[in-house]
Image (spheres, rainbow, N blue to C red):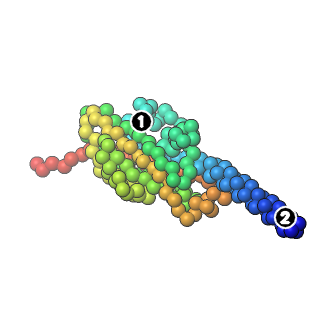
């Protein structure tokens, strides 16, 4: 009977140690995921400076060092993204000229660790890439030959989502995983051919 009591105490200690180790492992995993989600981006605009004005919160992209694409309200609006997190980024494209402008918009990414980021895009509150049910890869965020009328503005809403993937655990083992997204715009004055 005494041996049985000792065995039970030993078993209870082992169970307690295992529970503590699991809790430490979970805490460590949360810290790792927190660190890897510090996602940044880069912006590239070609030939749009004098033709189109692009802004976030009424501030020109030319005057901001970092766009707010991945600002996450769950992390005090820091650029931290974790699996299953979602967010939106709104920007405005203005044509302040008295001529129609034609532009292209596309995105690409630097993604060494294969973070499974998905996107969809609204133009004046209507989906033009993806839809309410469909998220797409970054390469599919592409608009070509968009016409901006004279003295007009358009609001774009970029929605992002880190969709669960089998490699999230591997990413979670890293101390830091960087993800960069590039928004590219090119524009020109629209020239319409006419028959004479």
| CB contact under 8 Å: marks 2 and 1 | no
Q: Position of residue 2 (x, y in %)?
A: 88, 66
- Distance, label 2 to label 1, CA atoms, is 72 Å
Asked whether, in this view, residue 173 is left or right of residue 16, the answer is: left
Taking the view exactly as shown, the residue that stands out farthest to the front is: 1
The quadrant of the rendering that contains the N terminus is: bottom right
Q: Position of residue 104 (x, y in %)?
A: 35, 49
Q: Position of residue 71 (x, y in %)?
A: 52, 41
Residue linked to disc 1: 55
Callout count: 2
Q: Nearer the viewer, residue 3 or 15?
A: 3
Secondary structure of the residue carrying tag 2 is helix
Q: Position of residue 195 (x, y in %)?
A: 12, 50
Asked whether, in this view, residue 138 is left or right of residue 4, the answer is: left
Which is more foreground, mark 2 or mark 1? 2
The answer to whether one can see residue 108 in this image is no
**Image-quadrant location for residue 14:** bottom right
The answer to whether one can see residue 153 in this image is yes
Asked whether, in this view, residue 156 is left or right of residue 19, the answer is: left
**Image-quadrant location for residue 110:** bottom right
Residue linked to disc 2: 5
Instruction: Please tell me which of labels 2 and 1 falls first in the chain.
Output: 2
Residue beneath the point at 62% across and 48% down: 34
Q: Nearer the viewer, residue 191 or 39?
A: 39
């Amino acid at each position: 009977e005494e041996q049985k009591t000792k065995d039970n105490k030993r078993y209870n200690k082992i169970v307690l140690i295992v529970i503590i180790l699991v809790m430490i492992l979970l805490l460590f995993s949360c810290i790792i995921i927190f660190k890897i989600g510090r996602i940044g981006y880069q912006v590239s605009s070609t030939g749009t400076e004098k033709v189109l004005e692009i802004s976030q919160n009424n501030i020109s992209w030319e005057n901001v060092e970092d766009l707010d694409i991945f600002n996450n309200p769950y992390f005090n609006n820091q650029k931290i993204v974790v699996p299953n997190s979602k967010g939106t980024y709104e920007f405005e494209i203005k044509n302040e000229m008295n001529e129609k402008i034609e532009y292209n918009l596309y995105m690409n990414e630097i993604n060494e660790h294969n973070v499974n980021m998905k996107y969809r895009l609204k133009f004046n509150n209507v989906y033009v890439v993806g839809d309410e049910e469909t998220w797409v890869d970054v390469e599919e965020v592409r608009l070509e030959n968009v016409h901006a009328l004279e003295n007009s503005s358009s609001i774009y809403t970029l929605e992002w989502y880190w969709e669960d993937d089998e490699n999230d655990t591997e990413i979670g083992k890293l101390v830091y995983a960087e993800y960069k997204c590039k928004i590219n715009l090119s524009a020109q004055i629209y020239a319409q051919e006419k028959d004479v």
